[in-house]
Amino acid sequence: MTTSTPSSHLTHDELSTTTELVADCREVVSSLRLERVVEAVSRPAPSIHFEDYPREVVKNEIQVSAAAARIANALHLHLD
């Protein structure tokens, strides 16, 4: 078993200047687009009441081409 030797440099030696760190932080804050988060948080929550949603939802009609119907019938899928 080997023992680890301490590093020859300290981690704080690698840090940028305070001015550069502040500039980096400001750039990160501006790129986060926190305005959208504030807007989303300030909106009211969606309703959980059943009567606020439609009871009947119209379903889209699916068109099956003749070629697709022939293939489905050949595979015994019966799409009609």
Image (cartoon, rainbow, N blue to C red):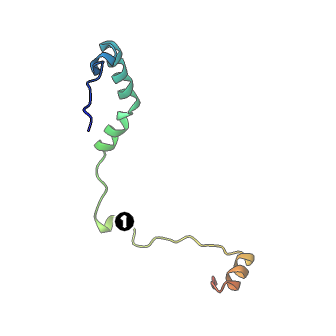
Q: Residue at x 33, y 64 (%)?
A: 52
Labels in figure, total: 1
- Compared to 37, does 78 lie above or below? below
Q: x and y percent of residue 54 in the render?
A: 40, 68
Q: Mark 1 — residue? A: 53
Under circle 1, the secondary element is loop
In-image side of 68 versus 28 (left or right): right
Residue 64 in the image: x percent, y percent? 67, 75
Q: Residues within 10 Å of mark 1 (few under 14, many from 20)?
A: few
Quadrant of the rendering where the C terminus is positioned = bottom right
Q: Quadrant of the N terminus?
A: top left
Task: Say which of 69 and 75 sits in front.
Answer: 75
Instruction: Name the residue: 70% across, 76% down.
Output: 68
Image: 24 above or below 51: above
Q: Quadrant of residue 70?
A: bottom right
In the image shown, does 46 or 66 lie closer to the viewer? Answer: 66
Q: Residue at x 30, y 19 (%)?
A: 8
Label 1 is placed on what type of residue?
A: Tyr
Quick one: 68 or 60, which is closer to the camera?
68
- Between 35 and 8, the one nearer to me in the picture: 8
- In the displayed structure, 28 sits above or below 53; it is above
- Looking at the rendering, which quadrant does residue 3 occupy? top left
* Name of the residue lying farthest toward the right: 67
Which residue is painted at 59% across and 72% down in the image?
61
Q: How far across and how far down the image is residue 33, in percent?
A: 39, 33
